[in-house]
Amino acid sequence: MAMEDSNVAPKNKSFEIILGSSSAARREILAEMGYEFSIMADALMIKLEATGKLKEMSRPTLLITADTVVVYQGTIREKPSNEREARQFITDYSGSSARVVGSVLVTNLVTGCRKGGWDSAEVYFLDIPEEVVDSLIEEGITFNVAGGLMLEHPLIFPLVDTVIGTADCVMGLSKTLTENLIRDAL
């Protein structure tokens, strides 16, 4: 994947990165961090291992995977599974808060070294109008993200009162955590 500004040299000249995620937010964050990377699904990783292609890698190759959940009043929330659940999730956040917990695992595919960790952030919301809830559900984006909300969504962003922690953690890939894990896995 090419970086946004072709005049900027990538940070990872001595190693390769594979992002094991289809998340647009994670792709954006990793590119913002200055890395070039390719995207590969878990099924392809299994195929690489089975065919011995991993052993043929000439320089360190890091696989970065991540997952995010939302915790609301002690209950873990993944992606909403239906409209009723999505509506309940978003309505619950109105005038309230939720904690986002994101985990990152960096695997050095050449050495087998694995380094993982987690980060969290607390998001406080203003009142979320019913028409915003309706629009988000109609748009369908709410079904693709943990807890049903994207901090960066233009309908939600103005309704975020405070974030204690970092926006990149809320969006699915903590920059500081990822940088530290990359360093440790090399």
Image (cartoon, rainbow, N blue to C red):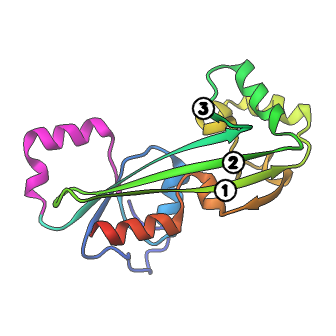
Which is nearer the eye, 172 or 16?
172
Q: What is the three-letter code of the residue carrying label 1?
A: Ala
Side (left or right) of 152 relative to 67: right
Report the mark closest to the observer, 1 or 3.
Answer: 1
Circles 2 and 1: CB atoms closer than 8 Å = yes
Q: Is residue 35 above or below residue 146?
A: below
Labels 1 and 3: the sequence-earlier one: 3
Q: Secondary structure at mark 1?
A: strand
Circles 2 and 3: CB atoms closer than 8 Å = no
Give the Cα separation between the discs numbered 2 and 1. Answer: 6 Å
Q: Secondary structure at mark 3?
A: loop
Side (left or right) of 101 relative to 111: right
The part of the image, by quadrant, that contains residue 155 is top right
Percent x, y of residue 138: 75, 27
Side (left or right) of 13 relative to 91: left
Kindly identify the residue that appears in the image at 72 percent across and 38 percent down. 72
Percent x, y of residue 62: 28, 60
Labels 2 and 1: the sequence-earlier one: 2
Q: Mark 2: few, some, or many residues within 10 Å (few <14, many ≥20)? A: many
Which quadrant is home to the C terminus? bottom left
Q: What is the three-letter code of the residue carrying label 2?
A: Arg
Which is nearer the eye, 49 or 76?
76
Residue that mark 2 sits on: 99
- Bounds of the magenta segment: 38-57
Give the Cα separation between the discs numbered 1 and 3. Answer: 18 Å
Q: Is residue 53 magenta?
A: yes
Disc ID at residue 121: 1
Residue that mark 3 sits on: 79
Our reading of the magenta stretch's main secondary structure is helix
Kindly identify the residue that appears in the image at 71 percent across and 22 percent down. 85
Labels 2 and 3: the sequence-earlier one: 3
